[in-house]
Each structure stands twice: as structure tokens, then as C-alpha cells.
Amino acid sequence: MGRLRPLRLPDVGLGALTRWCPPELVDRAIRKHSRQERRRRLLPARTVVYFELARCLFPQEGYASVYEHLLPREEELDLYLTRRGFRVPNKSSLCKARRRLGPDVMEEVFRQVAGPVANEEDCPTAFWRGLRLETFDGTVLDVADTPENTAEFTRPAGGAGTGGYPQARVVALAECGTHALIDAAIGGRRQGETTLAMALAASAGPGTLVLADRNMPGVPLWTAFRRTGAHLLWRLKGPTAQRVEKVLPDGSYLTHMHLDKNLRAAYRRRGEEPPGPVPLRVIEYTIEGSDEIYRLATSLLDPQEAPAHELAALYSQRWESEGIFAEVKTAQRGSRSVLLSNRPDQVRQEIWAHLIVHHLTRDLMHHAATATTPPLDPDRISFRTAQRLVRRDLSPLLSPPVTSADVSNRPL
């Protein structure tokens, strides 16, 4: 039989998900970051991209088991492997292939596939008065406890000392009605959510209403999102924008949010002109059974075009972002709570891969929901069930059918 050697895979994909992440798209990302092979490799960059995505679908399995999911199952190929000899690449080879690929290709694939997917006709829950509803928020992910990861991401600090694992921070912008990811930024704990969120502003724009929680409001971030043409509905912290300038008929009032004096001084130290105060409308309300006063700030200043009671009811959709992170951290990753990559570049690569797989799954769910008559609300489809079906569908659709001629000419 001779020495067993790895087999160079034919074209691979992600089963049903390949419709939204085809090989041509992956190849563009590889070429953009100059990761294409200069010589023929048994683990080419495209295969490594799909291998990394498959790891997200099978988070409890080792490298060899995940790689086996990429192998076609045709009888002719099985006969070929039996005659010629074959072994799955070892973990060391797959780790080296991941390092060669780096995080930039995975980030580029994410940016190629991410974006809103709903239209108002078949998914009205993603819109309000013609505005697409979007939300952004942040979360942290425990990563492998290595010196490199600790230096890059740092551990959380508390009264009982530092945490057991370094943590990467992720901030994501998503479509409310479908949970489809639109943009994301990755950093360490040293970078706050508002700092990372600045990178998301460019992905909002005219025709959107962006929701955020009370940790986000501030003149720089508000200004960055408003410059894109997006409208905003953000919860305020207690002391922010309390000066009433004009009371409106629906009980809301107009005011301005001013830049903190420390931030103003920081701008001037850098030789930059501080942004001026921003106009906003404040809506205050309570919820039955609670004495807490909720305060929302919005850029929609006309109460006739944006009634206060509708905006107050609408704000609950901000929690869609919490559901998205739960899907990634619990449903998709399973019980494994720590990202196992030992180096910061591979941590980022792994996070981008998880975001890609989540978005592709949500895109598939939206397609399934809107293909019915009448269309279904995508929230009625279980994310866990969708990913279970994707895993079941994976192997048979990974590669094109293999003919006898393909087998006889297939290189080792």
C-alpha cells in the first residue's frame, strides 16, 4: 500500500451554507490578503477557511474529526482511498495551516457575507415606519490562558483578584428582525465597548434606526452614527441630558447632550476641535410594577413622525443583541466556554469564523422563513434546530459528485 499521505481535497464548501459563502467569495478574500499558494499544498487556503468554519459547527470535536467532515463520501473515492492509502492531516499540520492563513482572510470573508437580509414586504418585524431596525452591543469571550493571549487581551479584574482567563471583547451591529450580523469589531478588555463601536458607525446609514443601551451614549459616538444618516434610539444614564429646553405635546422634551469636560480637554491636547453639543429628544417612562424611570434619547425630534409611546415600546428590541450573543456563545459553541486558540491571531480568526457561521445560519433561516406562503417570522425558527440541520447536511454537499475519471486522475 505504501506510505500513507494526506489527500489534497477537491472543492469544498459548507453544505447548504455554501449558497451564501461560495468558493469564489472565499478565493477573493484569499487573493486580497495575498494568502494564495505559491506552490501546490495539501492544505490550500480555501480548504483551511472551510475547515475553520467547520470547527464552529463541530466545536466539541478535535481537528482530525472536523477535517473528516470535509471528506466526500462517494463510493468511488472510498475505494480509491482504500487502494492508495490515506491519512487525515495531523493536528500540527492543521495548526500550521491556520497560522499561514491568519485572521485577515476570515475577517474579509465576514465582511463579504455580512449585512442586512430582510425586506419590509416579507419581514415587517425588521422595520418600523420604513426604518430598518438595527442594534449593537458588546460581550466578552474567554480565551486560552497563554502568555501571548494574556498580553494581548488581558484578564478581567475584580475585588477577588484577576479572572482565570484572558478575555477578548466583541461588539456587533445586527438587524433586529433577523439577527443577521451587519458589522463587528474585536479587541481586548483594555478597549471599551464604545471605543470598538466607533468602527461600526460606517455600517449604519440612511433609512436605519439604531438602538443601543445606556452604556453607549456619548457625543463622539452619537455624532459618528448620525454623520452616516442613521437615526438613533439609545437609553440614557441618569444624569445625562436632564436639562429641559422644550416640552413637546406627547410629554417628551428637547435638549442637548454635551461633551464631557475631560473628553473636551483630551481633544484639545491632540490638537483637534471637540464636537459640539448634539440635539436630541428625551422620552421618560415607567414600566408597570417598577418605580424605575427609563430615559431614552432619540434623533427623531418630531413627535408626530415618531410618537413617544411607539418608541418606548420599540426599545425592547434592543435586547435582540443579547439573543445573538447567546446563540453564538451557547447554542453554536455548545458547552465549551473557552476559545482554545493559543495565539491572538488565531483567537481573532476563530471569532471571525464564529461570526461568519452565525450570520450564514441566520441568513439560511431567513430564506427558509420567507420562502413560505405567507412568510413566517424568522423568530419562529429555532437557531439550534437550524444548526443541527446544517451539520446533518454538511458532508453530502461538501464536494461535487466524483466520477471514475476524477478518481483515476486525482493527485495525491
Image: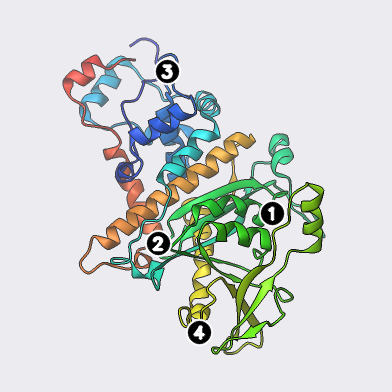
> CB under 8 Å between callouts 4 and 2?
no
Q: Secondary structure at mark 3?
A: loop
Residue 11's spot in the image, x, y percent? 31, 29
Please give the label number shown on residue 192: 1
Who comes first in sequence, dot 1 or dot 4? 1
Residue 59 visible? no
Residue to which mark 3 is pinned? 41
Residue 34's spot in the image, x, y percent? 48, 24
Looking at the image, which is closer to me, 47 or 6?
47
Q: CA distance from mark 4 to mark 2?
A: 24 Å
> CB under 8 Å between callouts 4 and 3?
no
Q: CA distance from mark 3 to mark 1?
A: 41 Å
* Image depth: mark 3 or mark 1 in front: 1
Please give the label number shown on residue 309: 4
* Image depth: mark 1 or mark 4 in front: 4
Relative vertical location of residue 183 with respect to residue 382 in this rendering, above or below: above
Residue to which mark 2 is pinned? 178
Q: Secondary structure at mark 2?
A: loop
Position of the C terminus, as image quadrant, is top left
